[in-house]
Amino acid sequence: MRGAKPTAALRPTRRHLLGRAAGLPLVMLSPGGAWADSGAELKQALAAVGKGRKPLSGRLKLDAPEIAENGSLVPIEVSFDSPMTEQDRVTAIHVFADGNPRPQVAVFRFGRLSGQARVAIRVRLQQTQELIALAETGEGNLYETRALVKVTIGGCGG
């Protein structure tokens, strides 16, 4: 019915809209929302991936800019020095940002036929923070590397 006006029952009233708006702050303040303790969540997430293993250094490389003028699009690349053979291969790469409300940024799983253990993504960082990359190998080893990214506000320092 072209040109028909909505009936009064379909039109939102001011009371209806205010009632919906009143519920929004409750979502933001609920546990696990934007105000959750990201330090505790980061420790839990790293422990879940680590499963009691002590991370090794070397072989894993995290390329990230030292200064990011636009925190909403920070390019990073994570690579692992591996021939990706049956004996020496990466099974997963995990990326974390310690200042984000949800610290686990991404997980990449690699199959047996993967040619390289390398990923490139753009992450959103609200503030200056440390990025953490973990790589799991087929032998059960865990490798870790970190990079600090300074996020500037409008290009004027932050």
Image (cartoon, rainbow, N blue to C red):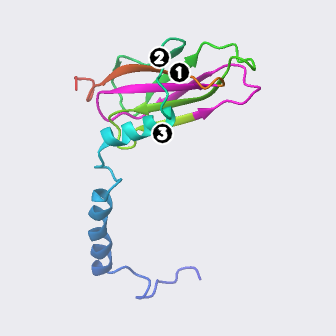
* Residue located beneath label 3 in the image: 48
Asked whether residue 122 is drawn in magenta, I would say yes
Dots 2, 3 in contact, CB < 8 A = no
Residue 24's mark? none
Q: Amino acid at mark 2?
A: Asp
Secondary structure found at label 3: helix
Residue 112 coordinates in the image, percent (x, y): 75, 27
Residue 104 coordinates in the image, percent (x, y): 45, 38
Asked whether residue 115 is drawn in magenta, I would say yes
Extreme residue toward the bottom, this view: 8
Secondary structure found at label 2: strand
Q: Is residue 152 left or right of residue 41?
A: left
- Closer to the camera, 52 or 30? 52
> What are the residue bounds of the magenta stretch?
108-137
Mark toward the viewer: 1 or 3: 3
Q: Quadrant of the N terminus?
A: bottom right
Q: Amino acid at mark 1?
A: Val
Q: CA distance from mark 1 to mark 3?
A: 20 Å
- Closer to the camera, 151 or 142? 142
Residue 142 coordinates in the image, percent (x, y): 53, 24
Q: Is residue 79 left or right of residue 67?
A: right
Q: Amino acid at mark 3?
A: Ala
Q: Earlier in the sequence, mark 2 or mark 3?
A: 3
- Closer to the camera, 81 or 142? 142
Q: Is residue 70 above or below residue 19?
A: above
Residue 63's mark? 2
Secondary structure found at label 1: strand
Crowding at mark 3 (Cα within 10 Å: few <14, some 14-19, many 20+): few
Q: Quadrant of residue 116?
A: top right
